[in-house]
Image (tube, coloured by chain):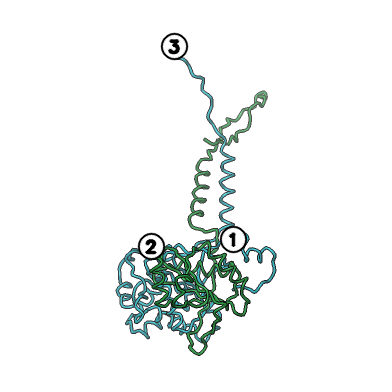
Chain colours: A green, B cyan
Amino acid sequence: MAEMDTSSGGGHKKGPGVKKPKKLSTRVDLTPMVDLGFLLITFFVFTTTMSKPTAMNMNEPKDDPDQQLKVKNSGAMTILLGKDNQVYYYMGELTADGASEQFKSSSLKEIRQVILDKKKATPMGDLMYIIKADTQSKFGNAIDILDEMQINTIPPGHYAEVDINEVEQMLIQKTEEANGIK
Amino acid sequence: MGRAKIPRKSTNIDMTAMCDVAFLLLSFFILATKQKPPEAVTVAAPTSVSSKAAPEKSILITLTKEGKVFLMLGEDTKKKEIIEDINTTRALGLTPGELSKLNKMSFIGMPLGKLKALVNLAEALPPDRLEGIPIRDSANNELVYWLRSVTNAYAGTDQTKLQEILLVKGDAEALYPDFKSIKAAFKKNELFKFKIVTNSESAPVGSELYNVNKLGTKATEVK
């Protein structure tokens, strides 16, 4: 296929009595070189990565009962994670009667606006997001919510991951049944 | 009758240009990419807007979506100490020969009781036969023992350095209770700071973080 013609052109005049050396054609075929080049490219494409994996910092609080933070109801928002990427939330504390109204469903996309609205409406000293994930939620969901904290520039002392309690677990189940376990 | 003669043209194509392009692409890939670190198992990490790069040498705990946990112990000198420490504290009974074989393995993926058998196998187990380090039973969370050996090996050195290299990489589809067990293992060893490996994602347009980045203003630094 590929050829490089390195033979010098003809056209020299024959001098009288000069012996004309026999010129051999030196055509070089470049196909193997191209093959090698593409093999090397393929090797590098498969064994390297362009994006550097990034790391998210996690701070675990010490489980010290003496240092339990007192959170004002007015500034608290609890975000709950259910199975199948479901997100629920409520403000403040759940009361026995008002639970069904306070408990709201949301999705990963809509929660961002809710978080932002809460942040704007609350003085920073009272602001606290409590994140609870139930036993069927995914690790990816928890990371997404922590990511939402970063996206909305919530400072690190104002959100925490906490264990879910039974009342909330039951509320999640009821909501899932009502919605046909989406 | 004579057959119609199709005039033939020469089909010699000059490949020099193709060769040039091939080497240009090759140079691009060599210069712009980095080698992927060898992984125990491929895991699809969730994305996050964190912009800090993950450290290269690290103690990496990998959580697959089935809930299997694999541990890669990083740097060689400390790795040897960690393995020797867990051998003595958990009385695994590994001989020095078996210890060095375990040291050569790139990751730990079996319960402590089965390590002796694993090391003496003639050929490596395929990844789906590996059971991972058991963490689901809170009474027998073996990751606690491994992390204890890690803290023992790093005791006396700067603890912030250890925090910088503790990494958890979980599959986005892994269940939250498994991650909770990993967190519990860290807590039991008084390791309160660690990092989670995520794939990078740019800040969504119009969000607070996007505005902060755009304006370059130093808002409260979100670590």
**Residue under the point 52% across and 70% down:** A146
Residue A160 shown left or right of residue B83 in the figure:
right
Task: Check if mark 3 and mark 2 are on a common chain.
Answer: no
Q: CA distance from mark 3 to mark 2?
A: 80 Å
Q: Amino acid at mark 1?
A: Pro
Q: Amino acid at mark 2?
A: Ile
Residue B181 visible in the displayed image: no
State the residue position of label 1. B204
Q: Nearer the viewer, mark 1 or mark 2?
A: 2
Q: How many residues crowd around disc 3 within 10 Å: few (fewer than 14), some, or many (20 or more)?
A: few
**Residue under the point 50% across and 85% down:** B155
Residue B173 shown left or right of residue B56 in the figure:
left
> As rendered, which of B104 and B70 lies closer to the eye?
B70
Q: CA distance from mark 1 to mark 2?
A: 29 Å
Q: Amino acid at mark 3?
A: Gly
Task: Determine which quarter of the picture holds residue B135.
Answer: bottom left
Numbered disc 1: secondary structure? loop
Where is residue B199? Give x, y as percent: 52, 63
- Tell me whether the residue at label 3 lies in contact with that at label 1, contact meaning CB atoms closer than 8 angstroms: no
Badge 3 sits on which subunit? B
Badge 2 sits on which subunit? A
Numbered disc 2: secondary structure? loop
Q: Residue furthest bottom?
A: A66
State the residue position of label 3. B2
Instruction: Look at the image and tell me in which quarter the C terminus of chain A lies.
Output: bottom left
State the residue position of label 2. A181
Image: A9 above or below B149: above
- Tell me whether the residue at label 1 lies in contact with that at label 2, contact meaning CB atoms closer than 8 angstroms: no
Q: Which disc number belongs to residue A109?
A: none
Numbered disc 3: secondary structure? loop
